[in-house]
Amino acid sequence: MTSLRAAALLLDMDGTLVDSHAVVERLWTEWSLSHGIDPARTLAIIHGRQGQESMAMLLPDRPHEVNLAENRALLDAETAQLDGVVAIDGAAQLMDDLAGLPHALVTSADLALATARMGAAGLRMPPLAITAEDVHASKPDPEGFLLAAARLGLAPADCIVVEDSPNGIAAGRAAGMRVIGVGPYAAAAEPTWAVASPASFRVAADGDGLVISFAD
């Protein structure tokens, strides 16, 4: 086994712990078509990023208030549509491993959506969750990860991020943190380590922090 140590693990949600791929892509495809935008262009930028920021990139001349209102409607639809939302392989074990250890959820979803999706997937919500309401800038900005470290009372360099999307991996790296990239596309974003899923590693207590073990 290869082992590494950290003071805390900071976890993304969608694509990392929860598979919400189908509903996210369906709703954003509908939104794109209603605005005359190629859905492929939309789906290439939205993952890990707050909706209003994606809209601003796709429709740069629109007022910010319109983007906020349409993103609010999208979030409400995502919160209501939970069919097919399931835990990713190894996510339940990872959350069990982390019970009582320093960790946080850091997601671009708002608190209502994060709570709904974690619940639908049968996963425990961490005691600390940094959601869309807590930050001014979404991933790839590092604000969310830096805020999580600060609220845990830890130095950023002592935390490890677990992420799947290029935006999330870039945010973790910009925060000065090591990053475990999970899923089939993570390696291309150059995380510190790349694994297939949360099932690829285990977490245990290590003094005041934790140790993460990978199978060689």
Image (cartoon, rainbow, N blue to C red):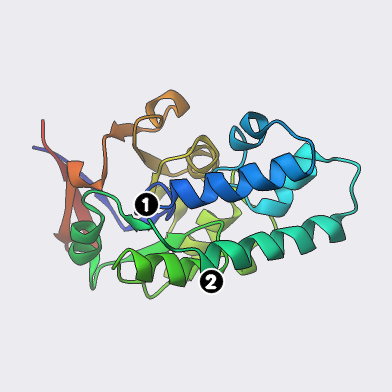
Marks 2 and 1, how far apart at CA: 26 Å
Under circle 2, the secondary element is helix
- Residue count near mark 2 (Cα–Cα under 10 Å), binned few <14, some 14–19, many ≥20: some
Residue 118: give x, y in percent of width and height.
38, 66
Amino acid type of the residue that numbered disc 1 sits on in the rendered structure: Asp
> Which numbered circle lies on residue 1?
none
Label 1 CA crowd tier, 10 Å (few <14, some 14–19, many 20+): some
Q: Could you tell me residue 136's position as x and y percent?
A: 70, 60
Residue where numbered disc 1 is placed = 158
The reply to whether dot 2 and dot 1 touch (C-beta < 8 Å) is no
Give the position of the N terminus as an image quadrant: top left
Q: Is residue 61 left or right of residue 107?
A: right
Residue at image location 51% in from the left, 35% down from the top: 166
Q: Position of residue 34 (x, y in %)?
A: 76, 45
Q: Of 129 and 89, which appears nearest the observer? A: 89
Using the image as rendered, state which of residue 185 and residue 216 is in the foreground. Answer: 185
Q: Tell whether 162 sits left or right of 149.
A: left
Quadrant housing residue 183: top left
At label 2, the amino acid type is Leu
Quadrant where the C terminus is found in the figure: top left
Where 73 falls versus 34 (above or below)? below
Determine the residue positioned at 22% across, 57% down: 94
Q: Nearer the viewer, residue 128 or 121?
A: 121
**Residue at left 25%, top 68%?**
101
- Residue at left offset 46%, top offset 47%: 22
Which of disc 1 and disc 2 is earlier in sequence?
2
Residue 26 seen from this side: yes
Residue 111 numbered tag: 2
Vertical placement of residue 92 versus 22, above or below: below
Q: Residue 42 location in percent, x, y?
A: 66, 36
Q: Is residue 171 left or right of residue 141?
A: left
Closer to the eye: label 2 or 1: 2
